[in-house]
Image: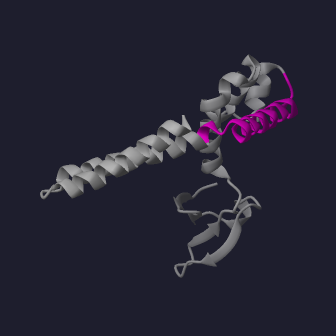
Amino acid sequence: MRGTAAVLSNRIVLRGVKKKYLTPIFQYSRMHKSGIMRIYDFPQKVCGMEKIVEQGILYDFYGELLTKRQRQIYEDIVYDNLSLGEIAQEEGISRQAVHDIVKRCDSALQEYEDKLRLIARFENIKAKISAINRLSEQFAEDDKIDRDTYMVYSAQVKRLSEEILQEL
């Protein structure tokens, strides 16, 4: 199949790709006036690159909780981008077995996140630290720093740092 693709937000723009080569998850949206470019929408559910990124993050946080064999197969799928057939041949098992292992790993990793919420906490703390950094940059750029302005910045930083400490 020849053609190029570019991902824009939640859409993928395809040039020179016939519709018959696309999987059913793509929904036809409109034809570009040039007649060459077609625009297809991704479904609402996480798919493609976003799913791979989500799998990688989940694995980074909870991968050590998987068995050695599960880790190896999951890394081959997510990080090495090997096909089910390649992994099955390497491991001496069926493609269906590889598929089942990957699905079980996805399910287990998502269950760990649902119960432990480490990624959610990490993202929340990261956002608060970014806010503290923005406040410190604003404080450094402010030419007219009086006591009242200092107290406002100080109170905001203190509140954010207390929220971080409570979350830990």
Residue 162, position as x, y percentages in the image: 45, 41
| Front-most of residues 57 and 6 | 57
Identify which residue is drawn at 86% across, 28% down.
Answer: 94
In-image side of 100 versus 45 (left or right): right
Q: Residue furthest left?
A: 143
Residue 3, position as x, y percentages in the image: 57, 58
| Front-most of residues 69 and 133 | 133
Q: Is residue 81 magenta?
A: no
Q: Residue furthest top?
A: 68
Q: Is residue 47 visible?
A: yes
Q: Residue furthest bottom?
A: 33
Identify which residue is drawn at 66% across, 27% down.
Answer: 63
In-image side of 130 versus 87 (left or right): left
Residue 45, position as x, y percentages in the image: 71, 57
In-image side of 125 versus 29 (left or right): left
| Front-most of residues 54 and 84 | 54
Location of the C terminus by quadrant is top right
Residue 125, position as x, y percentages in the image: 49, 42
Vertical comparison of 140 with 13: above or below: above
Vertical comparison of 82 with 121: above or below: above
| Front-most of residues 147 and 128 | 147
Residue 80 picture quarter: top right
Where does the magenta region start and end? 93-119
